[in-house]
């Protein structure tokens, strides 16, 4: 990788740069497919078997038949570890909720296996699995008090008396709702209702807790507060949490590992920092946070795309603007948005695409129409082969 060129403007030779801006930048994303690891490949080869709580092996799920059939899951394999906060992340229709329902027992796979502690559980009904679910709607019993809602699952298992009372008290203490034990759900805020649903699901001490977008109905400030609460509760209980969400920030801030899904497949699985800093394909780079995906040819790699995060793009002003700068391209500011801690601006590169820049050190005098040079540090550029 030696050069970076958009249009006809030459740029000094720089390691880790682009060459030959592609004129088919607008071609559909699906023409550059992202491929998951080979079927059957264990994504956690270095982890002891005892730590592998759930194994999903080559699972396929199809809804409908014939021309109207929808392949919701396409040969999915992954491992979920004990005492892990694991997140299934992706857009609507990617298959994440279908996989969650398979884990819960509400759906059955058409092919493949799902094992819990090494034992197949595909044929186990939901009530025979050591798995509980917190639904998006919370599904609280409106006529029962908070403590009776939490006790419900324990009583269904045949427990009673002092054992239930002690467990309910412990759960309410865990979710910090002890003073509200006698209230009904309609006397609680959305965040409080969410914590009641969580306490009820945790009370029977399941091996696996499934969270189906439980924070989507909360406002931003409350949602962020509940993210911290969920992380705390998962750490204190040691129960494996599996979260389904389409919110990238939620997934990055809460998870030990994230599986990014699209079109029924797992595109990338790993820790949040690896997913964010080293996306393995264009879809992941686009979907996780903000990214500038720049079409071109990486010299020596024949790669069609490269990505750089908006916070890693620099701007040069004054004497450097209007002509080539080291590892940079000239352009013109087309939009400026103040975001509080940072400022975001869009820069139309000369002969190239629009690049987003988001930093906390951009001058307040930055205005649309201003000529600048976008700087691309070589160590911030990531080649995308697909």
Image (cartoon, rainbow, N blue to C red):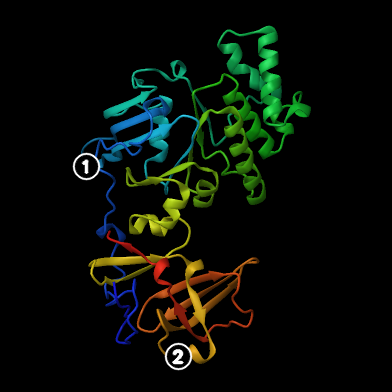
Q: Is residue 382 above or below residue 44?
A: below
SS category of the residue bearing label 2: loop
Which residue is under mark 2? Answer: 322
For image coordinates 38% across by 17% down, the residue present is 124
* Badge nearest the viewer, 2 or 1: 2
223 up-or-down from 143: above or below: below
State the residue at coordinates (75%, 27%). Answer: 178
Residue 221 is left or right of residue 92, and the answer is right
Taking depth in this image into account, of 226 and 151 the one nearest to the observer is: 226
- Left/right placement of residue 56 relative to residue 341 reads left
Crowding near the residue tagged with mark 2, few <14, some 14–19, many ≥20 C-alpha atoms within 10 Å: some
Quadrant the C terminus occupies? bottom left
Image spot of residue 292 (x, y percent): 42, 67
Left or right of 157, for residue 4: left
The label shown at residue 102 is none
Q: x, y percentage for residue 213?
A: 52, 40
Regarding residue 144, the answer to whether it shows in the image is: no
Residue at 66% in and 24% down: 171
Tell me the quarter of the image containing the N terminus. Answer: bottom left
Tag 1 or tag 2, which sits nearer the N-term?
Answer: 1
Q: Residue at x 53, y 33 (%)?
A: 135
Between 175 and 83, the residue placed more toward the observer is 83
Q: CA distance from mark 2 to mark 1?
A: 55 Å
Q: Which residue is mark 1?
A: 67
Task: Indicate whether 107 appears above or below 318.
Answer: above
Q: Position of residue 93 (x, y in %)?
A: 38, 45
Mark 1 neighbour class, 10 Å CA radius: few under 14, some 14 to 19, many 20 or more: few
Q: Secondary structure at mark 1?
A: helix
Residue placed furthest toward the right: 179
Q: Looking at the picture, how far across and down is residue 281, in whole percent? A: 33, 56
């Amino acid at each position: 990788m030696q050069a970076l060129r958009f249009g006809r403007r030459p740029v000094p030779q720089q390691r880790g740069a682009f060459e030959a801006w592609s004129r088919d930048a607008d071609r559909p994303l699906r023409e550059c497919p992202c491929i998951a690891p080979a079927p059957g490949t264990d994504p956690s080869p270095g982890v002891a078997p005892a730590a592998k709580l759930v194994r999903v092996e080559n699972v396929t799920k199809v809804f409908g038949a014939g021309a109207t059939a929808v392949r919701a899951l396409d040969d999915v394999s992954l491992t979920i570890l004990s005492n892990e906060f694991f997140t299934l992340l992706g857009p609507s229709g990617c298959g994440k909720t279908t996989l969650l329902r398979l884990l819960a027992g509400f759906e059955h796979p058409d092919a493949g296996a799902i094992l819990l502690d090494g034992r197949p559980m595909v044929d186990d009904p939901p009530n025979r699995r050591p798995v509980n679910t917190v639904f998006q709607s919370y599904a609280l019993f409106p006529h029962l008090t908070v403590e009776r809602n939490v006790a419900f699952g324990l009583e269904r298992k045949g427990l009673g008396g002092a054992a239930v009372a002690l467990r309910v008290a412990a759960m309410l203490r865990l979710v910090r709702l002890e003073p509200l034990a006698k209230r009904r759900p309609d006397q609680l805020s959305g965040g409080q209702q969410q914590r009641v649903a969580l306490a009820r699901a945790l009370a029977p001490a399941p091996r696996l807790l499934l969270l189906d977008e439980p924070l989507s109905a909360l406002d931003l400030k409350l949602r962020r507060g509940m993210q911290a609460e969920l992380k705390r509760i998962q750490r204190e209980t040691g129960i494996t949490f599996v979260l389904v969400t389409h919110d990238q920030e939620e997934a990055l801030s809460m998870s030990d590992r994230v599986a990014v899904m699209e079109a029924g497949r797992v595109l990338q699985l790993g820790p949040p920092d690896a997913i964010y800093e080293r996306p393995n394909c264009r879809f992941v780079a686009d979907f996780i946070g903000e990214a500038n995906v720049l079409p071109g040819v990486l010299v020596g790699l024949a790669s069609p795309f490269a990505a750089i995060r908006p916070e890693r793009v620099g701007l040069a002003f004054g004497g450097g603007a209007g002509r080539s700068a080291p590892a940079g391209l000239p352009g013109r500011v087309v939009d400026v948005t103040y975001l509080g801690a940072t400022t975001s601006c869009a820069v139309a590169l000369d002969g190239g695409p629009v690049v987003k820049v988001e930093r906390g050190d951009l001058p307040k005098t930055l205005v649309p129409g201003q000529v600048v040079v976008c700087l691309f540090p070589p160590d911030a550029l990531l080649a995308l082969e697909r």
